[in-house]
Image (cartoon, grey):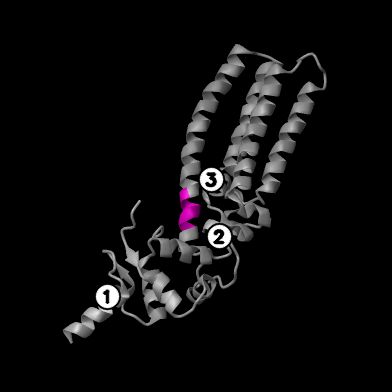
Amino acid sequence: MMGTSETLWHRLGTSRWLTNRRQRRRWVIGTYVGWLVIAAVVRLADMASPSWDRTVILILLANSTAQLLWLGRRTYMSSPTFGDAEPDERLVQIKNQAFRKAYQVFTIAAGIAVLVIAWAITAQPGEQGFADWFVILCGLMLLATTLPTTIVAWREPDLADA
Amino acid sequence: MAPSIWNRITVLRAERSLSRQQLADALGINYQTVGYLERGDYNPSLELAFRIAEYFQLPIEAVFSRHPFAPMSVQLYRKEESA
């Protein structure tokens, strides 16, 4: 059983300022808006540039890595770590709700992504089609790895209010 | 949303001059959870409810109720008057 003054966010291995909900929500928005910006860049980029695709891939990897690092790798992949601090029953409930919601959101996102990828490949053969589906795939990966944590980050109240 | 289970944790904790942290440590839960319980934002499991009642050394119905509690002072005076 937990017997210290740890908060949920301290236990998640994130820094103290993340106890502020407004900051957390900004980070969550930044996480996904960052991906949208990259997706927009891919759509608008000049395909003539020879190093273009490599640059985009690097940007995408950097974006995904940064978000994963920020989230302290507290994703479904490290769920044993997420739970090993023996959270109490309310925290377990929050975690389970977040995973359920993440699954719902991801299922819808994946369904839409498959349609968009199919369109991108068939309607735009060549590099643009490849770039588009790669960006969408990276977005899906970002969603899959970060959604449960970002849902908790979005929902948890300020420490002062709790 | 109105809580479906009312409790007297705030009063009992205040009577014993316990902080939320102290109570949380004694019960083995997060101190935020104590706040959620006190505000009625979270209904505890049966196991936690019993643990809380045992900690305060009271029957569970003295700590939790499906109906709002009358103030303790009112209940005490009523008992004294009827005795």
How far from the left and from the top, in percent, is residue B82?
Answer: 17, 83
* Residue A90 seen from this side: yes
Q: Nearer the viewer, residue B6 or B76?
A: B76
Q: CA distance from mark 2 to mark 3?
A: 16 Å
| Label 3 Cα crowd, 10 Å radius (few <14 / some 14-19 / many 20+) | some
Chain of the residue displaying label 1: B
How far from the left and from the top, in percent, is residue A114?
Answer: 53, 26
Q: CA distance from mark 2 to mark 1?
A: 44 Å
Q: Is residue A137 above or below residue B53?
A: above
- On the image, numbered disc 1 is attached to which residue? B74
| Label 1 Cα crowd, 10 Å radius (few <14 / some 14-19 / many 20+) | few
Chain of the residue displaying label 3: A
Point 59% across, 71% down: residue? A4
Q: Nearer the viewer, mark 2 or mark 1?
A: 1
How far from the left and from the top, in percent, is residue A103?
Answer: 48, 41
The span shown in magenta is A92-97
In the rendered structure, the answer to whether residue B41 lies left or right of residue A131 reads: left
- On the image, numbered disc 3 is attached to which residue? A151
Q: Is residue A135 above or below residue B26?
A: above
Q: Secondary structure at mark 2?
A: helix
| Dot 1 amino acid type | Val
Q: Is residue A95 magenta?
A: yes
In the rendered structure, the answer to whether residue A115 lies left or right of residue A12 reads: left
